[in-house]
Image: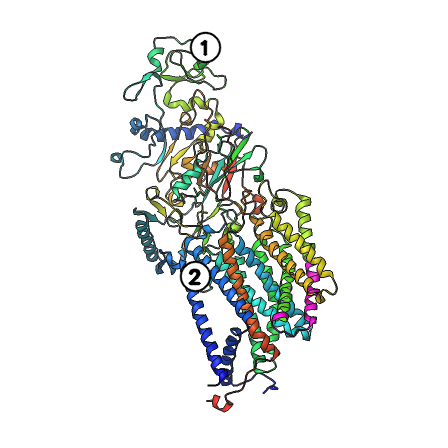
Amino acid sequence: MEQAPSDVQSPSTHRVSYPRFLMRAISAATDGSFLFYAWMTGLTAVFLVGVNAWAHQASSGMINTHMTDHVSWGLYIANFTFMVGVAAGGVMMVIPAYLYKDRKMQDVVIIGELLAIAAIVSCLLFVIADLGRPDRFWHMFPGIGRFNFPMSMLTWDVLVLNGYLIINLHVVGYLLYMRFLGRKPNPRWYKPFILLSIVWAVSIHTVTAFLYQGLGGRPFWNSALLAPRFLASAFVSGPAFIILTMIVLRRFGGSRMSDQPMNTLVKIVRVTILINLLMVISELFTEFYAGGAHTSSARYLFFGHGEANALVPWIWSAIVFNIVAAVLFMKPDLVKHTKLLVTACTLAFAGAWIEKGMGLIVPGFIPSTLHEYVEYLPSHLEWRVAAGVVAFGLLVYSASLKVAIPIFRGDMRFEQAPPKETAEK
Amino acid sequence: MERTQCPNGRLSRPLLVLALAGLAPALALLLSACGGDVAPETAPAGQVAASAPTGVHIRTVPGVPTIPAGPIDARGHQARVACSTCHSIKAPDTTRKTGAELTAFHQGLQVAHGSLSCLSCHNEDDYDSLRLADGHRVPFERVMDLCAQCHGPQARDYAHGAHGGMSGYWDTTRGLQTRNQCTHCHAPHAPAYPAMKPTFKPRDRFLPPTRESNDD
Amino acid sequence: MTEKSSGLTRRRMVKGLGATLGAAAFGAALSPLFRSSGMNAAELMQRHYKELTPADKQAVIERLQAEAKEAFGVSISIQDPRPTPQTKFVYAINLSVCNGSGKCVEACHKENNHDRETKQSYIRVLEMPKGTMDMEQGNTTYNHTVPSPDKFYMPVQCQQCDEPPCVDVCPVQATWKEKDGIVVVDYNWCIGCRYCMAACPYHARRFNWKKPYLPAEEINPNQGYLSNRVRPQGVVEKCHFCLHRTREGRLPACLEACPTGARVFGNILDPKSNIRWVLENKRVYVLKEELGTKPSFFYFFDK
């Protein structure tokens, strides 16, 4: 059966093996050491706090956020944007693995895909958290609602994000199931989707950038560099997070991964973080050299405006984080120094997070289109909701890793308990 | 250039139309409008005809001018006296040019209207009508003709609905549009529009109102 | 039973207990959602404005009137006037005359049943130093006697653009431009994503961060379905040129309130209209012309 050339298998066998695969997956996802339980319980608690905060927001209105008519998007959309980047960045494992046929990489590529799934789930939750009328969410469904496609970039984003989620679910599910059955996956069923997912990963972040850069009334966003900058920072934050995951798995999950895939990722970040910095410099040069009213957001962001300077510490932290991380990543044998590597990845990740949120989404609204300086810092409620969404993403990520790793290691296999004959007819 | 060319014919015709159209409702509302502050569109219920009035109504100005005379009585009414009460028997003092120089009955009369003096607009011998620059008499109701002599651009803009407040209907075929005259907004002796205090400001979260205020 | 399988059973029981507790905690966490009343199936399932049949619309309006009666104890009347053929509304403001008193702001607030606590209004007035058109120099929070000798005043509200970026970006077509040029919002279809607020270059859109608070005696009972009816929480709203008035031929509330007569409103398709004369005879300009939004809202100076 292992050497079956194709995946042709009687449907009745799948009828037995697939539910068993799901059962085993659920069981594996909920079994583990004390540490694992503590981690998952903690995440669940944070998630529930977030759910509660969101329920308050949905019932009494978004007045409890610090968003205003002037700064009408805040922490939620900032995190949404950042999470799209993380999801897109996950694909940076796929490119070396399948485009350059890196065998060692193929063993860990699943981590990137699972990260993409968890990040997209968080993205969608962040969008729902940001809606004033979550009960009308169905208005966005094509068919029963009124989908303003292709005019609204938001409809494009809905399509590409859900598409990306489905593609990754398919690839991950298929590869895991085949491994579980102990069969060689049929390239016909995953290769095209992997290639598609590479293109698609670029598209999700490009479309998300288009959401902002297409708005002529917001000069801070209305820049052709926004989409490439988004991609560059995505290819920093995604791989940085995967490196951190791999270190954690090695420490606590008994993973036997070699250094080589991690090294590939470090090489990727080493380049992309510099590209990102270069783009930031180019953007800042344009803003500050030419000057004028269009640069008021950048001036506010970096230097404040009179007494309004809430974002100044954020952006300078991000700049310092990015530069320190970039320098650390230059170290040729960074992989060998776990502590330094963790520091570098954490700084790069945090730097990208600030840059996308407090450094990009929020200053786009300050000054407002009538040039009023109304400041924004997230409220407690917003932090709670955001933490809840991130916790849910981490729950998905942790549980799916908990399933995927034993399957890939070969520890979790389909035992052919029921004889074939009884399964048929 | 274009402005000065703006022909008089084009100006006067709409003015005439406005005046004519305003005449009928003006008469009907003469009583209620004598205070000058009553919005004529809120006509007494009994007067509302089967079809609502349409067209343009120009708010009337109080006809014969009066000034406050003496203290307020027990009922709170200000006793007023028509200018002509005295001026029909007493010749004006033509040596005085401004309100500040006048004493009896004219205290508090602020005059700040360019280089004009009393007799630029008032008839020496008839204080119940106004005097155009060419010496013609016009009733007080036609005060706009008087103002238009100097304020041509404003009169032209007024004729085209681009100067002066209005209320009611933009579509005058469907309802009545009520318009002010010059003296509803501009005190004739001191026509500069009075300063105001902005009393209603939106209350924005995280955008405190300006603290400094140059009045107090 | 072997030891191993009994361990498994115990484990399964613990897991089941955990799952039950988790589900209960989830339900408890969500409980604030169910506190909010006012949610009903008819509202939840209501179709988009353009898909409502006349009968549907009648039913919706009756429901809204009944809800308002229940909430405020006052009888209101909601009309749904449609655009008149051969009519396109255009607005102009004479900045030489505007004195920044903010009477229009207040009139809008009252006419359109805005939230009393935030003193919401569709109009913001900028005080600008003479000699610049740079809004960066402007200020909306001035509270001194107006006009200041070295300042001019510029009220800004929805510009009713012919190329409205807010309409393009709406993911659910909850906002659109009507035949007479007015950009409207279906308050019962908007999902509250606020993308339109990010897209509008004129700060024309407002969001209902909470349920608007209105004392019953201050409600304007003369309401329009697409205009000044009391808005639900969590949706976007904007200036609609008082369409419940203007489509009946009446002037907008902000114009009537203007003490200086700075505002001119009318039908640009009527060659004899006031607004047409202004556009033909004054040197008018629009805000942020370079963005290509083609506003139906003009500004001019006399001198």
What chain letter is assigned to the residue under label 2?
C
Colour mode? rainbow
Looking at the rendered structure, the secondary structure element under dot 1 is loop
Q: Amino acid at mark 2?
A: Ala
Give the residue at mark 2: C29
Name the element at disc 2.
Answer: helix
A168 vs A139, nearest the viewer: A168
Of the pair C6 and B159, the residue shown nearer to us: C6
Instruction: Report x, y in % for residue C66.
Output: 30, 52
| Type of the residue with mark 1 | Arg
- x, y percent for residue A188: 60, 78
Farthest residue, direction bottom: A421
Residue A260 lies in the magenta-colored region: yes
Instruction: Name the residue at 30% across, 49% down.
Output: C69
In magenta, the rendered stretch is: A251-274
Residue located beneath label 1 in the image = B96
